[in-house]
Image (cartoon, grey):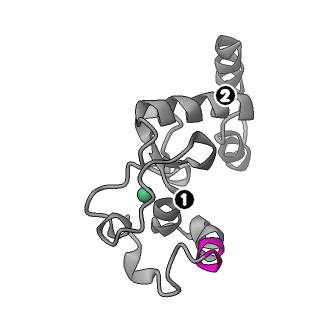
Amino acid sequence: MLQQLYKATRHKRSQGLDYQMVHHWKRQDPNLWNLSRERVWKRDRGLCQSPESAPPKQQGLCQGSIALSDCHIDHIRPLSSGGSNHARNLRSLCPVCHALRLDEKHRSLTSQLVKKGLIPVRWQSLSWL
Ligand SMILES: [Zn+2]
């Protein structure tokens, strides 16, 4: 099953798709992504992998241990910067650390967590790369 999915992905890559489509496709097939998610979460023993030096950890906002359903899988090098979906480019983050990682696409998540009171309104000084 997994092999077939990998094969299908490789096949798509070999076709001359324009950048937009390739970029879109690089978000893994949902079934494959669920497997990757679970694997990365297990590898990280369900612990948020943000660096000890990251402000959310320093300030005690990091949730530390996270359930698979709450776990955010982060692309260490973003897909938009040429990062891959390979396990070595993926890590488990708690929602707080993920939202505070400096990346424009996380802004809506940041405001959700501010509303829930998990992140201070002035979160800018807590962001990290
Ligand atoms: Zn965290």
The amino acid type, in three-letter code, at marker 1 is Pro
Residue farthest along the bottom direction in this orientation: 122
What residue does disc 2 label? Answer: 32
Name the disc covering residue 95, or none. Answer: 1
Where is residue 14, by image quadrant? top right
Q: Quadrant of the N terminus?
A: top right
- Using the image as rendered, state which of residue 58 and residue 24 is in the foreground: 58
Residue 99 in the image: state x and y as whole percent: 53, 65
Give the crowd class for mark 2: few <14, some 14-19, many >=20 residues within 10 Å. Answer: some
Please tell me which of labels 2 and 1 falls first in the chain: 2
Q: Up-down: is 33 above or below 23? A: above
Where is residue 37, by image quadrant? top right
Name the disc covering residue 58, or none. Answer: none
Q: What secondary structure predominates along the stretch shown in magenta? A: helix
Local SS, label 2: helix
The amino acid type, in three-letter code, at marker 2 is Leu
Direction from residue 80 to residue 12 in the image, left or right: right
Q: Up-down: is 80 above or below 113? A: above
Ligand 1 neighbours mark 1 (CB distance < 8 Å): yes
Direction from residue 37 to residue 86 in the image, left or right: left
The magenta-colored residue range is 112-116
Q: Mark 2 to mark 1: distance in Å?
A: 22 Å
Q: Nearer the viewer, mark 2 or mark 1?
A: 1
Residue 64 in the image: state x and y as whole percent: 41, 53
Residue 51 in the image: state x and y as whole percent: 30, 55
Q: Residue at x 41, y 37 (%)?
A: 44
Q: Residue at x 38, y 64 (%)?
A: 129
Confirm whether the magenta stretch covers residue 88: no
- Using the image as rendered, state which of residue 80 and residue 74 is in the foreground: 74
